[in-house]
Image (tube, rainbow, N blue to C red):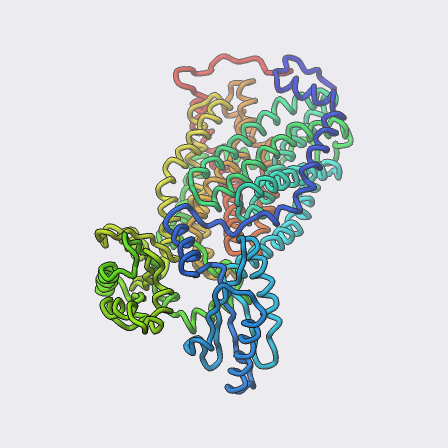
Amino acid sequence: MKTTVQGLDGWGRTGRFIHRFRFTCIGILLLFAVSLGIFAPKLPSVLGGDGFKTAGDYQRARSILEEDFKQSQDTLLLVFRRKAGTGQPEYKQRVAEMIQRIQKTEPYAAFRHPLQNPAMMKEDIAYAAILLKGDTMKELEKRTLAFAKRAEMMSDDAVDVSPTGFTVINDEINKRSQSDLKKAEMIGLPIAFLVLLLSFGSLTASILPIINGALSVGATMGVLYFLGREKELSIFVLNVAPMIGLALSIDFALLFVNRFREELSRRSVEDAVAVTYQTAGRAILFSGLCVFVGLSGLFFFRIDYIQSVAISGMIVVLLSMLFSLTMLPAALSLTGRRLLGRGSGTGHVFWRRFAASVMRYPVAITGMVLVLIAVCLLPLRDADLKFPGIESLPEESKARIAYEQYEAEFNRLAKTNADATVIVEANQAMTEADTLRKLEELARRLARDKSVKQVTSVFSMAGMSSTELSLLLESPQRDLVQPAFTAYTHGKRALLQLYLQEKPKSGAAKQWVRDFKAAYDMEGFSYTLGGVTTFEQELEDEIRRNIGISMSVILGSTFFILLAAFRSLLIPLKAILMNLLSLSATIGLIVWLFQGGRFGLEQSTVMLVLPVFIFGLVFGLSMDYEVFLISRMYELYQETRDNDYATLEGLVSTSRIITSAALIMIVVTGAFAFTDILPVQQMGLGVALAILLDATVIRLLLVPSLMKLFGDWNWWLFNRRSAAKHQPRYE
């Protein structure tokens, strides 16, 4: 029997308005989505590198090294390897011919090779370093990649030529990221559709959430294309935006469609849309706001990668909410009763028995869940959080293999000892005798430092003291030392390249870099520090400085959103605490999996930014299930004032939808665990594990157990205890 809806609030009236103007709504939104979506394929062309950088000494040092010392990250390394069966004389002759050919045909700004320096060639391997000419960064990158392809084609039956270096590695990460996106979509979307089909039992109902996700992601990537033309965005937005957008849009649609089918069984299409908008629509708004503020907390970290995640995530959340609250109800108004299938209805014997069991043993279940979380937290004691390097690429990558071979044969210290680059800026030119004397004093102090293993300076390269060098520079024989002097000084600047006794990426090495300026303060000298150690130290410090304010914004905003949604003090506090526990347990599991190299994963450190990413992104995503579950309990409690009844029936009616939504999100995000790029693997698997823990252990076990234990105190707000029965918001 159909019932009439009375007493609709603004939400319900909005749903009724969308129903009446459904054709106009669909037309406008499709035009909007298509207008942006046509630019989505162009997005990769405006994206930058991995985005692991922040403003500071490292970036300034890099600019100085490029401009003054011709040491650019765009320098291309060519690794020459002797093939089996090739004799030494033939191997050396072929390498010499290749180098001479490059000298004749390629316009370069700098070129170092074995014909200049025999130390750049060994029995089976040699390398050359070339920096091409380019008026702009884009032009230089384009020329470098084009030359890399030509150089690789120079390989013959005697010598294998492998280009590597920052530009080649970055380009491969970009290409693999695009390929990974397609791979993840091919894995995730068909399985998501199958889950929807099994859940709804209706082809039409199963297609709508997929369409909702596709429109949201397509429009988001179009928006990001225009943003990418003005601001440098990390290549990883290609993975993050679809990962968040598909999972969230499908979740929202799943909730909305499921509630619509429930209401449709006893109401007209128009009334079903109105009630669904008033209930599920409200839940989608608060859920989306939780995700949005979680991502907004990432803006406090001035790291391009994290800010790119925040920007792409926040845009896709807003567009997912837009399409879920406009296009979706309009589409449901058109499909109407065709959405009813064998999966409609809310009475499921299994879920009722499950809910009754949880309500029967709340203390035991709470204890078991807390023990499980404690076990997952144990690996955090041995967590080794660092920034990814060449290991971001898979082991079979040619660029990675070539770079690792170069390091092993020609730069072994880089594998075993942390590096540091010191750019010294003086008040006078480096040609002045007094300035050279002070520079030599600095170099000697560094050489005596117990933490320093090796110092390379103009004096070590020229093989003479500052006095001898100064005299020679003023003599007719200055050409003897000019190459070394030009390589390590420029105007008022000088370059010192160090290797420390500490291991790369170690805390001790980063601390030495932090303390350098104070420890080596000299009148007339100022310093800019570069090198990998400085790069990682600055990023780590940026995270440590801002983690407090970021978490405060995320936790505080989420608390007030849930407070407004449920008129309760205890529910937001419990939700935040449970999220913190489950997300910490997730990080523990990721550490256990990757640092141990378990289940076929390459043994590696965990990204330092991963906990930030997980907390910023998944804290909001996991609130989806909290809002879905508690919203239904809140509706029932408002009608009955019976906490146990509201908890039981709320769990029964939402368990299936939460399980289906979580499974889809796990599939969509977990598909990225099968990709080739290590940071993307860790992101995808981290999100999937977090959702798995949250939607099962937390939302289906711990939340209802605690709701049972706290009783009516769940709904307490300051001095107000809701004892009087309210009228239902609709009848």
Residue displayed at 30% across by 52% down: 527
Q: Nearer the viewer, residue 398 or 632?
A: 398
The answer, for residue 432, to whether it is visible in the render is yes
Q: Position of residue 320 (x, y in %)?
A: 61, 34
Residue displayed at 61% across by 53% down: 178
Residue displayed at 51% across by 72% down: 79
Question: Would you place residue 441 above or below residue 565 in this image?
Answer: below
The answer, for residue 372, to whether it is visible in the render is no
Question: Would you place residue 300 above or below residue 74 in this image?
Answer: above
Quadrant containing the N terminus in the rendered view: top right
Residue displayed at 48% across by 76% down: 126
Q: Nearer the viewer, residue 393 or 560?
A: 393
Q: Nearer the viewer, residue 461 or 339?
A: 461
Question: Would you place residue 268 above or below residue 101 in this image?
Answer: above
Q: Nearer the viewer, residue 317 or 8?
A: 317
Quadrant containing the C terminus in the rendered view: top right
Number of labels in the image equals 0
Left or right: where does residue 591 sit relative to residue 424?
right
